[in-house]
């Protein structure tokens, strides 16, 4: 497909140092078939690795965005889009066959301005396997009862480019999800398709449940979103990137702590047993 060819959809993939995950993402997109055609735009968000080269080798159109943050990258990708429908996903996400065609079909309804779907995690810890099912089931139930979408994940949402209100580029985490949903609702109808999930990396959860809830979601997501929306200028900055090397390091650290915990528990049980035995002999 040449830059002059018309397309119906543009898939925007923001990427910062994603050379390890990007090949699987782009390979899954290459298998998609959509009436009207589609293009893939990878937004290189000032990467320092081979992200741009990997994207080019896989046939994606690459644009570079120097301003840090996923909202700035997604905004740039949307501005570069040639398709009438813009699809947002991530560089560590794998898309099942038929995913894009199913998204596109929902826009046959002219009243629909956006379509969102769920994600599942690849090789997650047990709690990250359970949480998305419950969370996205709740979103689907509320949508079925009220027609209202509570939340969109930026790795599986599409919207019409005409009339798109734009991302708030002051925002970082959450700006491409919670704030995007708020802006899209002002334009028109947002619908939910719970039967069209994607599979995304669980690397952000490799530091454990407590760290994910308190640091990742509580601090970097919720507090970041709230403060940056209230302030005239960005107060909190982009969360530290978690890439393949950091994720592997976190997994090794968690395994070591499990060993330490097991040793301490075993030692505690043995000590308790010895004390009970000594007490009986007295």
Image (cartoon, grey):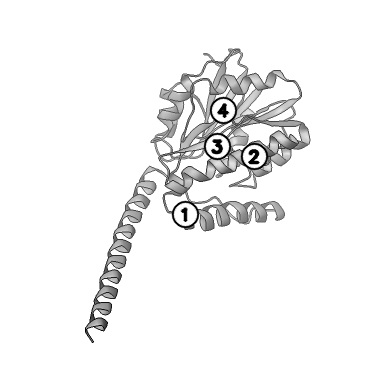
Q: Which quadrant of the figure has residue 266?
A: bottom left
Q: Which numbered tag is attached to residue 139?
A: 2
Is 100 drawn above or below residue 198 in the view shown? above
Residue that appears at 50% across and 19% down: 32
> Within 10 angstroms of label 2, few (less than 14), some, or many (20 or more) residues?
some
Q: Going from the N terminus, do you reach mark 2 or mark 3 first?
A: 3
Residue that appears at 26% across and 73% down: 273
Question: Which of the two marks, 2 or 3, is nearer to us in this view?
Answer: 2
Distance from the alpha carbon under mark 4 to that under mark 2:
14 Å
Q: Which numbered tag is attached to residue 65?
A: 3
Instruction: Label 2, secondary structure: give it.
Output: helix
Which x, y percent locates residue 232?
71, 53
> Within 10 angstroms of label 1, few (less than 14), some, or many (20 or more) residues?
some
Q: Going from the N terminus, do you reach mark 2 or mark 1 first?
A: 2
Which x, y percent locates residue 245?
36, 45
Which residue is identified by label 1?
A: 209
Which residue is identified by label 4?
A: 196
Question: Which of the two marks, 1 or 3, is nearer to us in this view?
Answer: 1
Is 254 drawn above or below residue 122 in the view shown? below
Which x, y percent locates residue 131?
52, 45
Question: Which of the two marks, 2 or 1, is nearer to us in this view?
Answer: 2
Q: Going from the N terminus, do you reach mark 4 or mark 2 first?
A: 2
Instruction: Label 1, secondary structure: give it.
Output: helix
> Within 10 angstroms of label 4, few (less than 14), some, or many (20 or more) residues?
some
Residue that appears at 48% across and 51% down: 240
């Amino acid at each position: 497909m040449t830059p002059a060819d018309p397309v119906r959809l543009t898939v925007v993939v923001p990427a910062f140092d994603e050379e390890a995950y990007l090949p699987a993402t782009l390979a899954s997109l290459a298998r998609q078939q959509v009436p009207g055609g589609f293009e893939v735009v990878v937004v290189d968000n000032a990467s320092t690795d081979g992200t741009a080269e990997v994207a080019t080798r896989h046939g994606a159109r690459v644009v570079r965005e120097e301003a840090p943050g996923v909202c700035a990258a997604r905004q740039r990708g949307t501005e570069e889009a040639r398709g009438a429908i813009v699809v947002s996903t991530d560089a560590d996400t794998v898309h099942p066959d038929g995913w894009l065609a199913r998204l596109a079909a929902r826009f046959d309804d002219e009243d629909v301005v956006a379509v969102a779907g769920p994600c599942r995690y690849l090789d997650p810890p047990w709690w990250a396997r359970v949480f998305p099912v419950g969370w996205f089931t709740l979103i689907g139930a509320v949508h079925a009862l009220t027609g209202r979408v509570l939340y969109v994940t930026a790795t599986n949402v599409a919207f019409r480019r005409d009339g798109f209100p734009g991302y708030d580029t002051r925002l970082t985490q959450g700006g491409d999800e919670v704030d995007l949903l708020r802006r899209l609702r002002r334009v028109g109808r947002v619908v939910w398709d719970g039967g069209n999930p994607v599979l995304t990396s669980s690397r952000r959860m490799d530091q454990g449940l407590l760290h994910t809830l308190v640091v990742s979601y509580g601090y970097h997501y919720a507090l970041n979103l709230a403060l940056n929306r209230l302030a005239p200028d960005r107060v909190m900055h982009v969360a530290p990137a978690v890439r393949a090397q950091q994720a592997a390091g976190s997994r090794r650290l968690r395994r070591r702590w499990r060993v330490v915990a097991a040793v301490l528990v075993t030692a505690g049980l043995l000590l308790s047993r010895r004390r009970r035995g000594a007490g009986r002999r007295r």
